[in-house]
Amino acid sequence: MATYKKTQTGITELNSHQLGLRTELRRLLILIDGKRSIQSLAPFFRPGEVSGLVDELERLGAIEMATPITGMLPSATASSAISSKQLQAAIGIAKTVAKSRFNRAADRFITELDRCKDSQSLRAIVSDIQLKLMAEYDEEMATAFVAQVRAEFNPKQ
């Protein structure tokens, strides 16, 4: 479940209006409390609008993730970095799962997956896809996508 919290910049913005946020961005910033998931805030906005607003508030430095989304792969450290072959296999699995779950709607996710250069960017992109699915559909669908990708990549776990 993706939960965001206000940064110091976000807190300052609520008091000073220095960023000059549009109404919908300000409303989302007010609603973000570090406890409620983004998916639970989606009903306060037009369908599909929340993920773009979250992206914009993040770019402005007004919010940050409060609870990390469970990654698909182990963290990339020297001892757990994956090989190029493993990375390509993981990307292929994520694409296959996206296609099987979302048909033509998967194209935009596949485009994102094609940008993966390492396991860290893959985790970030899978987390981003999860956020978008939570905002546009529901948390259950988003969680199921990540769980299926993880199960396909790590069948013994």
Image: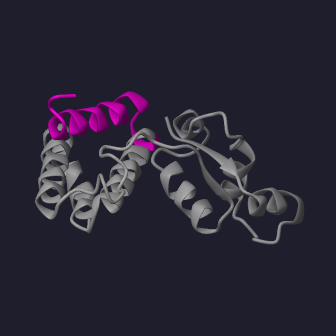
Instruction: Give residue 46's position: percent from left, percent from top.
Output: 53, 46
Q: In the figure, residue 115 lies in which quadrant?
A: bottom left
Examine the structure image and report whether residue 25 is included in the region drawn in magenta.
no
- Return the residue found at the far front: 79
Above-or-below relation of 106 to 60 = above
As drawn, is 8 to the left or to the right of 58? right
Image quadrant for the C terminus?
Answer: top left
In this orientation, which residue lies closer to the viewer: 13 or 120?
A: 120
Instruction: Give residue 140's position: percent from left, percent from top.
Output: 38, 27
In this orientation, which residue lies closer to the viewer: 81 or 61?
A: 81
Looking at the rendering, the stretch of residues picked out in magenta corresponds to 135-157
Instruction: Give residue 112's position: percent from left, percent from top.
Output: 28, 62
Q: Residue at x 16, y 29 (%)?
A: 156
As drawn, is 15 to the left or to the right of 148? right
As drawn, is 41 to the left or to the right of 123? right
Examine the structure image and report whether residue 149 is included in the region drawn in magenta.
yes
Above-or-below relation of 99 to 152 = below
Q: Residue at x 38, y 42 (%)?
A: 133
